[in-house]
Amino acid sequence: MAKYVCELCGWEYDEELGAPEYDIEAGTRFEDLPDDFVCPLCGAGKEDFSKAD
């Protein structure tokens, strides 16, 4: 499981935890999020996320 960070605002998506407050179940891989997924804080698209080190 990996973490991804929005390059615009810094919001972090952790695949292990998911984002239950946004109806994303724990264990959901970033690549499995819908193509129209946007950052819940700033509205950036998936292309604006990068894998965290």
Image: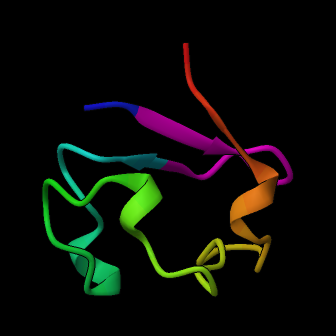
**Picture coordinates of residue 51 (x, y %)?**
59, 30
Depicted 12 relative to depicted 36: above or below = above
- Magenta stretch contains residue 7: yes
- Horizontally, is 20 left or right of 3 in the view? left
Quadrant where the N terminus lies? Answer: top left
**Picture coordinates of residue 20 (x, y %)?**
21, 75
Quadrant where the C terminus lies? Answer: top right
Depicted 22 relative to depicted 13: above or below = below
| Residue at 78 percent of width and 58 percent of height | 47
Report the residue that reaches farthest toward the left. 26
Q: Quadrant of residue 32?
A: bottom left
| Residue at 31 percent of width and 53 percent of height | 29
Residue stretch rendered in magenta on the structure: 3-12
Q: Quadrant of residue 10?
A: top right
- Horizontally, is 33 left or right of 11 in the view? left
| Residue at 26 percent of width and 76 percent of height | 24
Q: Quadrant of residue 16?
A: top left
Report the residue that reaches farthest toward the right. 8
Depicted 14 relative to depicted 39: above or below = above
Q: Which of 1 and 6 is in front in this view?
A: 1
**Picture coordinates of residue 21 (x, y %)?**
28, 80
- Horizontally, is 35 left or right of 8 in the view? left
- Magenta stretch contains residue 8: yes
**Picture coordinates of residue 18 (x, y %)?**
25, 59
